[in-house]
Amino acid sequence: MVHDSVVSCIGGTPLVRLSRLFPREGLSVLGKLELCNPGGSVKDRPARYIVESGLRDGTITSCTHLVESSSGNLGIALAMVARVYGLRFTCVVDPKIASANLAILRRLGATVDMVQDRDDQGGYLKTRIRRVHELINRMPSSMWVNQYANRKNWQAHFHGTAGEIITDVGEDLDALVVGVSTSGTIMGLSRRLREVFPKLRVIGVDAVGSVIFGAPAGPRQLPGIGASRAPELLSLEEIDEVIHVSDLESVHGCRDLALMEGIFAGGSSGAVVAAIRKLASSFSAGSTVLTLLPDRGDRYLDLVYSDEWVAGLPPGQNATSSAAIAGV
């Protein structure tokens, strides 16, 4: 098949049985390799869906200047899609962005605007969003993509990712384990998959130090998982459980995924591996668990795959245990 552009290559990512990491008899863990998307991450999907649907309904035109706050992946995806459709794009980032992501953004022609001040939760998200508002107020024809509140974020997964899973999985699904940041992925997947698998147990994976589910704010170093505010898209009643994973546990998950499965993935993939390990004893015999491996590991060479970076993590990091959402 010959594609018209790199954008039309988005999606159709494979499912892999993670039997080396999770060898327990009677437990099947499936990982959807979203890192195989052409832009390197699951964020290719909402970037394409938001831009293409906007071009169709007129909310985006050839004159539109897209603006978004991103820790890297959505920024790269939007930069890629903007190149194909001839749109201008400014990405607001912070010092925690991986150096590889920063370089890719610039090579794809995005304008990069980096904030420096931490917000009241110790992160940068609120600072980035303040900067977005400043930019759209002064730039003509600008539009904030707003991945934390844009319904097209979760709709991209409802109409795309989940449909692929239903077609490819070939068996019942008992549990969905997904890392949470904007919550678009977990919302879109859970809503569509529950139409087919009504007893599906939906488990969100958050970072220790993230406040998405009401936990206390704290230091966290990994981009791409967790947030310093709750996203507007999040519907708590649609998530059955939440488990928090520390940066260090995510590091171990990433490295084990590479060594045992040959899958070189990013920090949020390590987080879901760590979470499934903690949850394994709660899955009954014959269970099939689905997770997403959101992005590539090469962008984390100076983070989770750097011994020096790991040595600089705060001492005594401990993850909280799995908890029912009502108890978070």
Image (cartoon, helix red, strand yellow):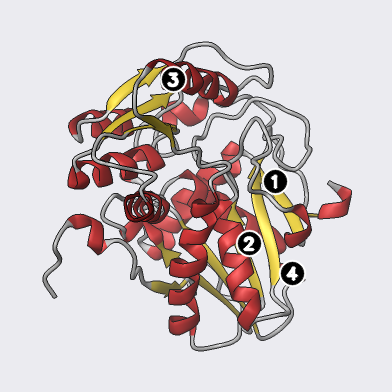
SS category of the residue bearing label 2: helix
Identity of the amino acid at label 2? Ile
Mark 2 or mark 1: whose residue is earlier in sequence: 1
Q: CB under 8 Å between callouts 4 and 2? A: no
Mark 3 or mark 1: whose residue is earlier in sequence: 3
The residue sitting at 47% across, 55% down in the picture is 256
Residue 131 drawn above or below residue 239:
above
Q: Residue furthest left?
A: 2
Which residue is denoted by mark 1 in the rendering?
244
Q: Give the foreground label among 4 and 3.
A: 3
For mark 3, does the 10 Å Cα neighbourhood hold few (<14), some (14 to 19), or many (20 or more) residues?
some
Distance between mark 2 and mark 1 Cα atoms: 11 Å
Which residue is denoted by mark 3 in the rendering?
95
Q: Residue furthest top?
A: 117
Between 31 and 64, the residue placed more toward the observer is 64
Mark 3 or mark 2: whose residue is earlier in sequence: 3
Identity of the amino acid at label 4? Ser
Q: CB under 8 Å between callouts 3 and 1? A: no
144 sits to left or right of 218: left
Which residue is denoted by mark 2 in the rendering?
276
Which residue is denoted by mark 4 in the rendering?
281
Q: Give the foreground label among 3 and 1.
A: 3
